[in-house]
Image (cartoon, rainbow, N blue to C red):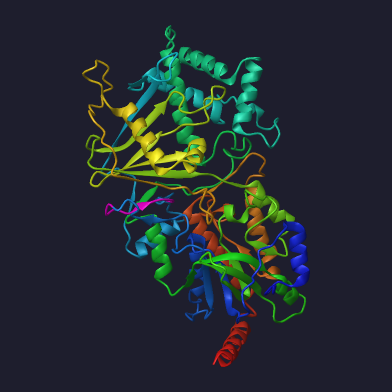
């Protein structure tokens, strides 16, 4: 077997650390040389490429040969817009909103770019307000089969908000704040809540403690007479909805995963309203990729990133560069690229992390392995999960002017011991009335369960939840006020499964229990500034956004784009004195290769 491009010493080192190593076993072919390689054509990779291809201050182009390698057959990464429902309307399956779109100092880079390319954005709905319908679905006591849908009770709403402040926020009434710095760094929100329950009611389950808390909170909110306990159940249902809205949906993770110490206190975001992008966020990123001459090679999955020769170059070898081996379109066909100035890794955090099936193996492989300071950060951070269930109905069955539908359920599929860990079918957005489209946003345990289900089962369960919540049994004497008399079967359903996507392995970065918070995120920027020039390797992506520059916001598309530009800027600075000579060398090598080929 011939191993192409991987020195024996590095191969032995990688095998010792990682086990069996993916290698290039194709027939020897000429390497393709360039100045800079960018791995990943998402927002970060496109941002890096655009910066490298920009003209300098004197108006002269950098004249760099830049190649972007992308494993998918499209650009955009997790910003993906398409018409999977075949209904004539393209939907955002990943990133949807420009967060902080109305920020003025600084302006959001994606807002500015959308304006430059005349792509309309809509911040908020002040000019065309829409309404929301919320219903609480309760089970008949003693039976999970009979459901009752009711309009939220004001006292229960007030009590649920008070409970949420106590259990999930760090304000004056917080129960968790006093324990934050006394519990281990590995403590999650769920761990802390169970600890509070055990201290206040030893020997009782968390569910029993929560019911007692809900009852006392109702009394404190001015509702002392609650003999039947129906408001207690409704208060807990509405609390579950708040946990979904404020924690799972915003932070993107489950209560048993969220870091107690860092989730609420770390991270940055530009101020201002969120904005929709006309045609979809993915289309904006696609425009950024096609509006300048970027050489993007789709269908190239990165197998290994070998910077051995770049380290040798630092020690006096003038031929140093980063060697990247790829697999084309899932076949056995391999190709090698050599980047003289450096390589910008704009792959998602989930792709950089160890394989779920084999924690000892990373794919792609870095040769030699990355320093422990960076690997530790990669492994401590985590990818959350948000999936979307996009449903096309034959006609609109919801009232005119409705923008969203919300379901507060009493228990969903949550365990009896901890009723705050599964909030299915909570939030549906009306994407359009014609075609009639609803999109449910699934997070946490629910999103993980979706990954294991068939589309048919997802569709059936979703429609059942909608019918339980919004069908109005006016003739039966138990009207819930929606006046919705029928909900038809869908025409078609599309379900995203971002965890199962091998080129994403999740949705965006969050601080899981055990992380060091923003310190772990800063590890990427520190590597870029301190070791990037030596190793000719730089990192970009939303997981590298440490807030050190305004707009460098973790978990956002605009942050990812900005991180790519900053990584490219760092590469240009590190190579400033050598760039012209490198380009001359590259042109000579290309000419030599051309003579050999002919």
- Point 59% across, 83% down: residue: 583
Say left or right for 475 vs 431. Answer: left
- Point 26% across, 24% down: residue: 472
The answer, for residue 548, to whether it is visible in the render is no
Q: Position of residue 112 (x, y in %)?
A: 40, 60
Tell me which segment is drawn in magenta: 87-95
Instruction: Decide whether residue 90 is among the magenta residues.
Output: yes
- Point 59% across, 75% down: residue: 337
Q: Position of residue 287 (x, y in %)?
A: 38, 65
Q: Looking at the image, which is closer to me, 328 or 331? A: 331
Most prominent secondary structure in the magenta stretch? loop
Instruction: Decide whether residue 299 is among the magenta residues.
Output: no
Vertical position of residue 253 compared to residue 174: above or below: below
Outermost residue to the front:
1
Q: Which part of the image, by quadrant, shows the C terminus?
A: bottom right
Say left or right for 271 vs 378. Answer: left
Vertical position of residue 82 compared to residue 514: above or below: below
Q: Looking at the image, which is closer to me, 395 or 461? A: 461
Image quarter of residue 290: bottom left
The answer, for residue 11, to whether it is visible in the render is yes
Q: Position of residue 137 (x, y in %)?
A: 38, 24
Say left or right for 126 vs 577. Answer: left
How many marks are shown on the rendered structure?
0
């Amino acid at each position: 077997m011939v191993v192409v491009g991987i020195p024996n010493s590095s191969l032995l080192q990688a095998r010792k650390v990682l086990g069996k190593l993916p290698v290039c076993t194709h027939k020897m072919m000429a390497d393709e040389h360039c100045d800079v390689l960018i791995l990943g054509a998402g927002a970060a990779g496109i941002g890096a490429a655009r910066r490298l291809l920009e003209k300098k201050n004197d108006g002269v182009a950098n004249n760099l040969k830049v190649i972007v390698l992308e494993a998918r057959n499209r650009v955009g990464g997790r910003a993906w817009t398409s018409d999977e429902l075949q209904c004539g309307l393209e939907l955002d399956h990943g990133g949807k909103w420009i967060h902080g779109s109305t920020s003025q100092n600084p302006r959001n880079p994606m807002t500015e770019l959308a304006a430059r390319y005349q792509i309309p954005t809509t911040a908020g709905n002040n000019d065309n307000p829409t309404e929301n319908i919320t219903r609480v679905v309760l089970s008949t006591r003693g039976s999970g089969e009979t459901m009752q849908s009711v309009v939220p009770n004001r006292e229960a709403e007030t009590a649920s908000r008070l409970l949420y402040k106590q259990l999930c926020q760090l304000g004056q009434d917080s129960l968790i704040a006093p324990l934050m710095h006394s519990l281990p760094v590995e403590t999650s929100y769920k761990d802390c809540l169970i600890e509070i329950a055990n201290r206040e009611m030893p020997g009782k389950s968390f569910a029993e403690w929560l019911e007692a808390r809900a009852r006392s909170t109702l009394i404190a909110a001015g509702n002392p007479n609650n003999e039947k306990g129906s408001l207690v159940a409704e208060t807990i249902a509405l609390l579950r909805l708040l946990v979904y809205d404020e924690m799972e949906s915003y932070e993107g993770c489950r209560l048993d995963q969220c870091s107690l110490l860092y989730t609420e206190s770390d991270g940055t975001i530009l101020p201002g309203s969120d904005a929709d992008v006309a045609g979809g966020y993915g289309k904006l990123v696609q425009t950024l990729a096609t509006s300048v001459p970027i050489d993007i090679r789709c269908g190239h999955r990165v197998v290994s990133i070998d910077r051995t020769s770049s380290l040798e170059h630092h020690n006096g070898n003038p031929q140093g560069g980063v060697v990247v081996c790829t697999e084309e379109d899932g076949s056995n066909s391999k190709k090698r690229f050599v980047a003289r100035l450096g390589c910008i890794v704009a792959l998602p955090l989930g792709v950089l992390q160890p394989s779920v099936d084999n924690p000892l193996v990373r794919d792609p492989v870095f040769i030699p392995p990355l320093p422990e300071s960076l690997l530790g950060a990669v492994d401590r951070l985590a990818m959350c999960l948000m999936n979307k269930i996009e449903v096309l109905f034959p006609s609109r069955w919801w009232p005119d002017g409705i923008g969203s539908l919300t379901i507060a359920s009493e228990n969903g599929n949550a365990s009896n011991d901890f009723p705050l860990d599964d909030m299915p079918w909570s939030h549906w957005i009306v994407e359009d009335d014609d075609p009639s489209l609803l999109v449910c946003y699934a997070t946490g345990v629910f999103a993980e369960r979706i990954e294991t289900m068939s589309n048919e089962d997802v569709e059936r369960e979703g429609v059942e939840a909608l019918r339980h919540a919004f069908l109005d049994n006016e003739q039966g004497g138990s009207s819930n006020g929606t006046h919705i008399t029928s909900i038809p079967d869908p025409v078609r359903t599309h379900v995203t499964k971002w965890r199962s996507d091998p080129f994403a392995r999740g949705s965006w970065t969050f601080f899981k229990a055990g992380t060091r918070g923003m310190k772990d995120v800063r590890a990427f920027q520190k590597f870029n500034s301190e070791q990037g020039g030596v190793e000719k390797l730089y990192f970009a992506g939303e997981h590298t956004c440490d807030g050190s520059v305004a707009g460098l916001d973790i978990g956002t598309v605009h942050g990812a784009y900005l991180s790519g530009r900053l990584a490219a800027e760092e590469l240009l600075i590190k190579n400033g004195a050598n760039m012209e000579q490198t380009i001359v060398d590259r042109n000579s090598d290309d000419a030599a290769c051309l003579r050999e080929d002919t």
